[in-house]
Amino acid sequence: MHALITGASRGLGRSIAREFWNHGASLALVARNGAALDELAAELRGRGAGTVEVIPADLSDPQAPAAIVDQLRRKWDHLDVLVNNAALAGPIGPLWDNDWREWLETVQVNLLAPVALCRACVPWMCRGGAIVNLSGGGATSARANFSAYGTAKAALVRFTETLALEIAELGIRVNAISPGILNTEMVDAVLRAGPQKAGADYAQVLEVKRQGGESPEKAAALAFYLASPASDGITGRLISAVWDPWTALGAHAAELRDSDIYTLRRIVPEDRGKQWT
């Protein structure tokens, strides 16, 4: 298995890289921090026989996705898995107080870069390949003071559902993961912003910092599951690493195919037992 993982230098991305490496994958690791990538690559090479490619890149640059794939295609003859993990929390606070350049950068990194990477990678991927997009808080419900982050992540989920339909005939699956609240740099960004800007999220995030948050290993294990043949038939879904029974989803692949389970949808009065006709 050849896997390209973005945001691999820290947090969840690092856990995903380790999970794939432990299952024998060859890795291409992408992040802005080249030194941190080199450190991780050295760790992995020290306990395995696979290959690790390090590609420092800043996904806030619209040219970066194409450059990443061009560089990797000179080293690999195919790609099996793309994991779009890189993300920014973005500006925190009311929209009108946000720095507009930061707002746009957040959409670029969290949405447009994953879309561009999918666009560049799909023609190069093998039948049976998989794309895993990391979603997050704000994708399925409104989250005040995180408009750039929530907008980008909600759009990424709908993009995942749409792309799944387009690439089904190619034999490539694409799913999104909700990893839960992890004790990562994004938590630190909320705490730095303070309660006045972060609003209701601040108290929850402070508790995550105290308690440790969800395990990144759960989300990493789900990412590998969705990249592996064990998840054949599962595509176009948003799956929670924490709350959903994903280890058993293979048995329900046929039911999922013709349902709206684990997808975004509009709630109508009838869904809540109301008749407004």
Image (cartoon, rainbow, N blue to C red):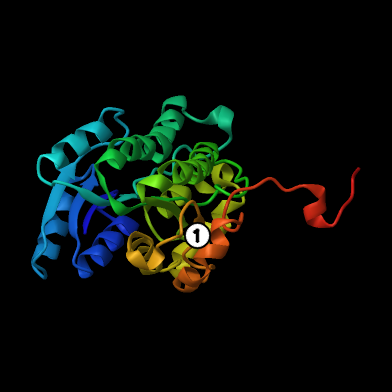
Q: Is residue 82 left or right of residue 138?
A: left
Write the residue at 18% across / 55% down. Answer: 27
Left or right, 77 with respect to 146, comes to: left
Which percent across, then down, holds residue 158?
Answer: 52, 42
Q: Is residue 229 above or below residue 148?
A: below
The amino acid pointed to by label 1 is Ile
Q: Position of residue 162 (x, y in %)?
A: 50, 41
Q: Can the viewer see residue 132 in this picture?
A: no
| Quarter that holds the C terminus | top right
Task: Where is residue 271? Give x, y as percent.
Answer: 77, 54
Q: How many marks?
A: 1
SS for dot 1? strand
Q: Residue at x 59, y 56 (%)?
A: 258
Disc 1: which residue: 239
Front residue of this view, candidates 24 and 143: 24
At 58% across and 27% down in the image, what residue appears?
96
Residue 201 appears anywhere in the view: yes
Mark 1 crowdedness (10 Å alpha carbons): few <14, some 14-19, many ≥20: many
- Above or below, 40 against 6 in this view is below
Residue 241, position in %: x, y?
46, 65
- Residue at 42% of width from left, 31% of height from top? 102
